[in-house]
Amino acid sequence: MAGHLERLERDGVTLLEDVYSEEQVAEWQRELTDAWRPLQRELPSLDWRTYRFKKEFIEADSFAVGKQLFEGKRIARRRSDGTGVIDLGRGRYDIYSGVMRSGVFSEIVDDPPPLLAAIADALLEIGYSSEDELGALPTLLPGDGEEGDEGGFWHRDACECPATTDNPPLLTGRSGLLLSDPLFEGQEALDLQLPCFYLTALLPLTDLGPGEGATEFVLGSHHVNLSALGLTTAEAIADWADTQPQFEATCRAGSICLFHGYTLHRGGPIRAVSRAGLDEQQRSRDVIYYGFM
């Protein structure tokens, strides 16, 4: 455990390899595939609304990439079972609640592996509870002959959002918080002085090799005051990230990528598509996420 704690402090991210068995992962993949395929077919008919933040929050000159990550994105909730879905663009979706509350998935957060629980207990000094919900991040694979995608937007996870949207009912039940924005708007230095209070765990359901969409991290960015560097837009953050040491969290299915809530990260570009572990009709790279706080 000491090595993981050292990497989390230094780099902001660590890999816990081969945590779950092939059988467990295969069951979760089947369940998610069976839930995601029909939802994909329903996407055009869902009652989509537009995600909006308060005007003063959008205009504030501070690092808050939630503005770029969520502002203007489409969000919907399926009436039949309450599944929430956010269209993040670039073929990337965030699905939560509804189908993600099934007993098959709930065991992931109800009974975390001992090593993961011990790390969370050591870092979150006042104790922790795993979130009562978890979600999935399916990313559509490029088709034959397509060049792949650009990757997701760089962002941080662990900050409570002080802004509201014009569609709050759509977010009800999703952890009660929208993560990705500063606790103290315009005072990032205060955020960085707080002890660690949030960890994100990513559980890939397929092997992720180089260029296959594994999450990318800017090493040590959980210690960096980005606003103080004048990095207040998605474009500036992306340009800066290109100059920094990065880590592509390639790993086998059933491993866990665990990272500090302030570590800058994004879904990596999909440049290569391995069909290992995928049936012919499955057209997405699937990752389950949950948090400790």
Image (cartoon, helix red, strand yellow):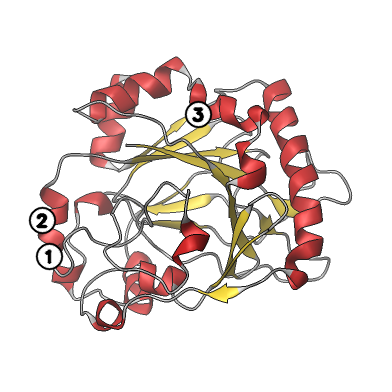
Tell me which corner region of the image, top left, top right, bottom left or bottom right, holds residue 155. Answer: bottom left
**Mark closer to the chain start, 2 or 3:** 3
As drawn, the residue found furthest toward the right would be: 280
Could you give the CA–CA distance between mark 2 and mark 3, rounded to whole angstroms?
A: 30 Å
Amino acid on which the number 3 mark rests in the picture: Val
Secondary-structure class at tag 2: helix
SS label for mark 3 = helix
Apparent side of residue 169 relative to residue 43 in the rendered image (left or right)? left
Which numbered disc, 2 or 3, marks the residue closer to the eye?
A: 3
First along the sequence among labels 3 and 1: 3
Q: Quadrant of the C terminus?
A: top left
Residue at 61 percent across and 34 percent down: it is 252
Question: Could you tell me residue 257's position as x and y percent?
Answer: 47, 37
Q: Nearer the viewer, residue 7 or 104?
A: 104
Query: Depth-wise, is mark 3 or mark 1 nearer the camera?
Result: 3
Instruction: Count how many numbered circles sit on residues in the image.
Output: 3
Is mark 3 in CB contact (under 8 Å) with mark 1? no
Percent coordinates x, y for residue 235 in the rendering: 38, 78
**Residue tagged 3:** 109
Give the labeled residue for mark 2: 190
Using the image, determine if residue 244 lies above or below residue 281: below
Q: Residues within 10 Å of mark 1 (few under 14, many from 20)?
A: some
The crowding category of the residue bearing disc 3, from other C-alpha atoms within 10 Å (few below 14, some 14 to 19, many at least 20), is some
Location of the N terminus by quadrant is: top left
Name the amino acid type tagged 2: Leu
Look at the picture and state if 84 lies above or below 142. above
Which residue is at 10% across, 56% downward?
190
Label 1 residue SS: loop
Write down the residue under mark 1.
187
- Determine contact: label 2, label 3, CB under 8 Å: no
Q: Is residue 291 visible?
A: yes
